[in-house]
Amino acid sequence: MAERKRRNILDPAVADLLAGMEEKQAEARLPKREREKIARERAKMRARKDHRVTYDLPPELKKQVGDLAEQMGVAASQIATYALIQFLQSYQNGEVDLSKFKVPSRSPRYEWKLVFPKSLLESVKKKKV
C-alpha cells in the first residue's frame, strides 16, 4: 500500500508565530554576549522608528539622490532631509505652486494626486550632480 503524504497547511499567521518562536529559541541558545548584542540592536531600531518614513519615488530620482549622497560621502537620508526642508521653506514662502499639478484622484483616501510632467524630472537629469 502506497503511503500518502500529508501536506501541512498552516494559516500564515500561525506560520509567522511558529517562526518567531523558533527564532526566540535559537536566540536563547546563543552565548550571553550575543544575546545582549541582539538586544542592543533591537533597541537601536526601536529608537530610530520615529525617524523613519517611506515615500514612493521615481527610480531615477532615488538613484540621483543616492549618487549625490555617495559623491558627498553622506547618507541619502540626509540629502533627502535637506531637500525636503528647502522645498517646505519655498512652499511656505509662496515660491512653489503645486496646484498646477493637481488632478482628481480615484483613491477613496485622497481627493487629489499630483501628476508631474516628465520634463520636470528630465530637467534635473540634465544638470550634472
Image (spheres, helix red, strand yellow):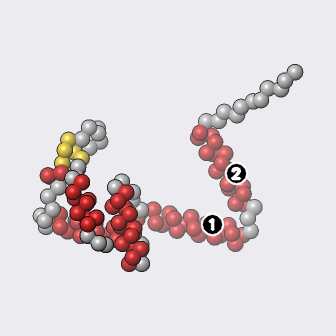
Residue 30 placed where, x, y %?
73, 64
Q: Residues within 10 Å of mark 1 (few under 14, many from 20)?
A: few
Please tell me the numbered disc located at residue 72. none
The residue under label 1 is which amino acid type?
Ile
Q: Is residue 41 left or right of residue 63?
A: right
Determine whether 1 is above or below 27 in the image: above
Residue occupying image coordinates x 59% and y 69%: 40
Left-right relation of 108 to 17: left
The answer to whether residue 55 is seen in the rendering is no
Q: Which amino acid, mark 2?
A: Glu
Q: Using the numbered discs, state the Cα–Cα distance from disc 1 to disc 2 in whole angstroms.
A: 16 Å
Frontmost residue, 26 versus 1: 1
Q: Earlier in the sequence, mark 1 or mark 2?
A: 2
Q: Which type of secondary structure does the marked residue at label 2 adopt?
A: helix
| Quarter of the figure that contains the N terminus | top right
For residue 22, the mark is 2
Determine the residue positioned at 26% across, 70% down: 127
